[in-house]
Image: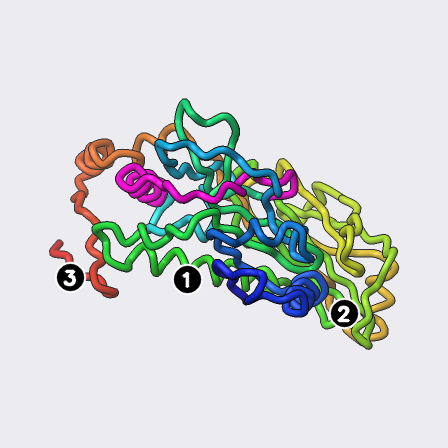
Amino acid sequence: MAILGDLTENELTPAHQERLRRWVIEAGGNLIVIAGESMPGDFFKSQLADLFPVRSQRVALAKSGYQLTVTAEGANAPPVMVAEDEITSLSVWEKVSAKLPIYDLSPYSIPKPTAHVLIQADAGSQSRQALSYLSWQYVGKGRVVYLAAPVAYQLRYRKGDEYHYRFWGQLFRWAIARGLGGGSRTVKLSTDKTRYPYRSDVNVRLRLSEVNGLPVDKAECELLVRSNDELIQSVSFLPELGAMGVYRASLTGLPPGKIRLEARGASIERLLEEEKYEDPIVLDLSVDPHDSAELRVAFGKCGASANHCRCFGWSCCRPCWRGGRPNQVEP
């Protein structure tokens, strides 16, 4: 893991840039970039330009400041989940940015088509186009995360370090966990997460390398998708541009429940045989059930929850987790 703050070209020399670029693209490094006065603007004509998930085009910023809005993709993303549940997490981001608007958003905030935007910056009626605050993209074998303003500290507003600490901790774990997939030494199968919300896309990554470590190019492989031991999809892997030995597949419309992914192909069979690896290359994940209207009413508001509790003779109390350990709750 590497984090770039507001460095200048004198501090991050061309030699450093070359090493950093190769580390991300070839070695699969995870890079976090935090925007500032010099970063990333001074580096769009450098070797790092392709790493950033935002365009080199400057945008005229709104003088009224920006508020943060979690996107549909970001709603269930681990870095965004700073509270115990999705609803509370969304509320935290909205309330903090409403109280403390962002005035120092980087003018380099227009996401590239390849970028995944988790939190966008909104200036209300003054917004002419969607800008990103928290975004990321794959680059070769690695991943680059971009924060368009150094304002994560604002999560401390009236809450101390609780949300701020959780944001950075989960951001690091989420980035590192990308490499924790299934497979062998020569065949690696991975996804961004092991749990996905209903109807969300699932991006699958396959990495092939010879026993000596060299990448396997021009391999023809397929991804088998099973639900309840029944084959429901078969998708061909496509090579990742600019990254030899890396292949990707995208899945849509997966049903709720447990899903098993399996990578197959002649190249995979050859590599496993040379490695003397006998198990199949599989990876398990789960898809959440559809969010029903009943669940939204029951858990969306405290009043509705209290009504349900009274109907069943239960007691309704506020969360009691404080200071790192649960307090005793009287029956």
Q: Please, is residue 238 above or below residue 127 in the view?
A: below
Give the secondary structure at mark 3: loop
Give the secondary structure at mark 1: helix
Contact (CB < 8 A) between labels 3 and 1? no
Give the secondary structure at mark 2: loop
Q: Mark yes or no: residue 255 visible.
A: no
Residue positioned 34% across, 60% down in the render: 165
Decide whether residue 294 is among the magenta residues: no
> Which residue is identified by label 3?
328
> In the rendered structure, which disc, 3 or 1, sits on the residue that comes first in sequence?
1
> Which residue is identified by label 2?
186
Residue 134 appears left or right of 24? left
Measure the alpha-carbon separation of dots 2 and 3. 50 Å
Residue positioned 53% across, 46% down in the render: 135
> In the rendered structure, which disc, 1 or 2, sits on the residue that comes first in sequence?
1
Quadrant of the rendering where the C terminus is positioned: bottom left
Q: Amino acid at mark 1?
A: Gly
User: Badge 2 local density, few (<14 within 10 Å), some, or many (20+)?
Assistant: many
Report the span colored magenta: 87-115
Measure the alpha-carbon separation of dots 1 and 2. 30 Å
User: Badge 1 local density, few (<14 within 10 Å), some, or many (20+)?
Assistant: some
Measure the alpha-carbon separation of dots 3 and 1. 27 Å
Residue 131 locus on image (x, y percent): 50, 36
Residue 256 locus on image (x, y percent): 55, 41
Residue 296, disc:
none
> Which residue is identified by label 1?
169
Quadrant of the rendering where the N terminus is positioned: bottom right
Q: Amino acid at mark 2?
A: Thr
